[in-house]
Image (tube, rainbow, N blue to C red):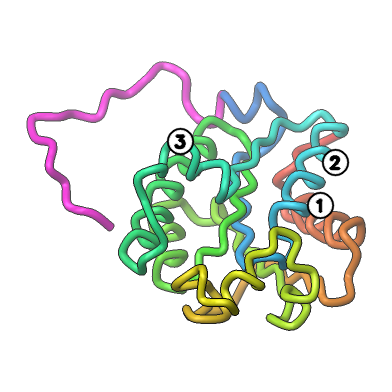
Amino acid sequence: MSEQKATNITWHEGHVARADREQLLGQRGATIWLTGLSGSGKSTIAVAAEKALAERGRLTYVLDGDNVRHGLNANLGFSPEDRTENIRRIGEVAKLFTDSGVIVFSSFISPYRADRDAVREIMADGDFVEVLVDATVETCEGRDVKGLYKKARAGEIPEFTGISAPYEAPEKPEVVLDTNSQSVDDSVAALVAYLEAEGYLGKG
């Protein structure tokens, strides 16, 4: 996904394996990648799912698009190239969380299919769960919780996904949440049910 510039480096193995960490936590580490338009409900669902799983004694963490741009990706804009690098970095961070045994909810517009597929490719089978938070531009614009669509329509925000920049929906996501009509509670219930059925939540 990116050029390897560092040389004379060797991967240092630890004495605690991923399986050991997962046994301690009683769960399987995974990256739950929520993708969709701005305003579709990705972050709302992610934080609600995090809370629901925490209440069940499961260790989770949310990587949110806006939050990450305050620190790790503060030097990136919204050009296609910067979007790709944004997702590449998050993919690597999510991979580390997954290896630690944590269930990480990654909430990013991540508009390009190739970028999301590249993250899937660096992970083991089953570690990457792609969730399409499906809402039309009209639905998202009607919410416009951050006032971004209004600014985009006024030309104040260039390269805004769904208005002046493309969004490529997943072709075969593991989960689809239709938030045009589905409530947050129903979306979270459906997502948790999938994780439970697929064995990510362990026993109990």
Instruction: Say which residue appears at 69% left-offset and 35% top-offset.
Output: 60
Q: Residues within 10 Å of mark 2 (few under 14, many from 20)?
A: some
- Span highlighted in magenta in the image: 1-20
Contact, mark 2 vs mark 3 (Cβ under 8 Å): no
Residue matched to label 1: 192
Classify mark 3: residues with Cα within 10 Å, few (<14), some (14-19) or many (20+).
few
Q: Position of residue 96 (x, y in %)?
A: 46, 36
* Mark found first going from the N terminus, 1 or 2: 2
- 67 and 114: which is toward the camera: 67
Residue 110, numbered label: none
For the point 39% across and 56% down, which residue is it?
Answer: 77
Provide the major secondary structure of the magenta segment.
loop
| Residue 174 in magenta stretch | no
Say if mark 1 contacts mark 2, CB within 8 Å. Answer: yes
At label 3, which amino acid type do we have?
Answer: Gly
Q: Is residue 60 left or right of residue 170?
A: right
Identify which amino acid the numbered label 2 is placed on: Ala
Residue at the disc numbered 2? 52
Placement of the C terminus among the 4 image quadrants: top right
Asked if 17 appears above or below 6 in the picture, the reply is above
Q: CA gap, disc 2 to disc 3?
A: 27 Å
Give the secondary structure at mark 2: helix
State left or right for residue 68 relative to residue 194.
left
Q: Position of residue 46 (x, y in %)?
A: 72, 49
Q: Quadrant of residue 108?
A: bottom right
Kindly identify the amino acid type of the residue bearing the numbered disc 1.
Val
Residue 113, percent from left and from top: 46, 73
Which numbered disc, 2 or 3, marks the residue that appears first in the sequence?
A: 2
Identity of the residue drawn at 74% across and 67% down: 144
Q: Can residue 153 be seen in this view?
A: yes
Depicted 201 relative to depicted 126: above or below: above
Real-space Cα separation, disc 1 to disc 3, in angstroms:
29 Å
